[in-house]
Structure formats: structure tokens, C-alpha cells
Amino acid sequence: AQAALLDGWRLEEWEPLLDDEAEYLVPPIGVPEAEHLSPGETMFIVAESRQMLAARVERMMGKAGFAELPRSNVRHLIGNVQVLADEGASVKVSYNLCVYRIRRAVITTYIGRCLLTLTRSDGGFRIREKRVMLDIDVLKGQGGLSIIL
């Protein structure tokens, strides 16, 4: 559901999927064991709290989101979904992703693995942590990450 909302630029509907303590993390590329790194000890490409994500959504949906005017066309492809742990109140999930960003006739591809920590809430799930480990070796062609992977 989150991929469909992100692909459709329905960010105001995506945002409530976030837990109050949510973190969105993109660790540095080319670093072994990136799933265990902490943004308090290592410089991350993206390390945003719930409040920072809310501000990002507001900026991206308004006229202040210059990096996404006009908006990119985005398509998430998700596979190899695995439930790694069900700890009652939370569930840890892993999946592979390929995100295509099409903007001004340029197609940019982001390939990687995502680790989600989900919390149970009102018969559904909310995102506590979304950690995207990119499998690319440089961000040269990808530029800035103005989209949400």
C-alpha cells in the first residue's frame, strides 16, 4: 500500500502510515553491514524523524518543493518480501526494491533492499523504521534523493 501511495504522489495519505516515532533512513552506500549502522555514529544520506518527514511531505506537495516541480513519475517494484520477525507488537520485514524515477525524459533507477519495522495499530500496521540500503556504488547518476524511496 505504501508503494502505491508514493507512486501516486498521495503523500498526505502515505504520511499517516508512519508511527509517531518513525524514522526514514538511507545509510551510506558501499558500506558493509549498513543495516546495523546508526545515524548518530555515521553520516547517512537520509536520516529523518517523523517530524522531518511531515515537513518534507508538506514541502513536496507545495510550491516550495522545487526539486520536484514538475513532479517526477515514480514507480516502485517490490519483491522477495520476507517477514524476518514477529515480536507481537512489532513485525520486521525485508524486501528488495527497484524504484524508477522519470523526470524530464531521464530515467533514474534506485536498486536496493529495504528493512521495515512495523508496529501494529488499529487492526493494521504503521511504519516505525524504514531503512533503505542502496545497491549502487555512487549517487552520481541519481543526484539528490528528493523522492521517498
Image (cartoon, rainbow, N blue to C red):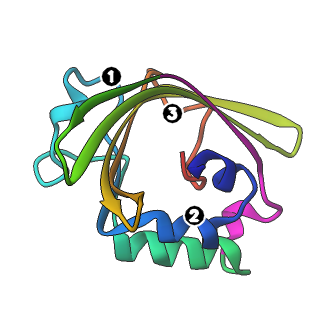
Say if mark 2 contacts mark 1, CB within 8 Å: no
Q: Could you say which quadrant of the image residue 48 lies in? A: bottom left
Label 2 Cα crowd, 10 Å radius (few <14 / some 14-19 / many 20+): some
Is residue 80 left or right of 77 when viewed as pictured? left
- Looking at the rendering, the stretch of residues picked out in magenta corresponds to 65-80
Considering the numbered disc 3 on the image, is that residue within a helix, a strand or a loop? loop
Percent of width and height locating residue 37: 16, 38
Q: Earlier in the sequence, mark 3 or mark 1?
A: 1
Q: Return the mark for residue 30.
A: 1
Say if mark 3 contacts mark 1, CB within 8 Å: no
Residue 141 counted in the magenta span: no
Identify which residue, 137 or 62, lies in the foreground.
62
User: Three-letter amino acid code at disc 3?
Assistant: Leu
Task: Tell me the distance, in whole angstroms, between the alpha carbons under discs 3 and 2.
Answer: 26 Å
Identify which residue, 121 or 31, lies in the foreground.
121
Which residue is at a point 77% across and 32% down the rendered structure image?
Answer: 107
Percent of width and height locating residue 83: 33, 29
Q: Which residue is mark 2?
A: 14
Considering the numbered disc 1 on the image, is that residue within a helix, a strand or a loop? loop
Q: Return the mark for residue 135.
A: none
Percent of width and height locating residue 130: 37, 48
Label 3 Cα crowd, 10 Å radius (few <14 / some 14-19 / many 20+): few
Considering the numbered disc 2 on the image, is that residue within a helix, a strand or a loop? helix
From the viewer's perspective, is the residue at label 2 or at label 1 nearer?
A: 2
User: Three-letter amino acid code at disc 2?
Assistant: Trp
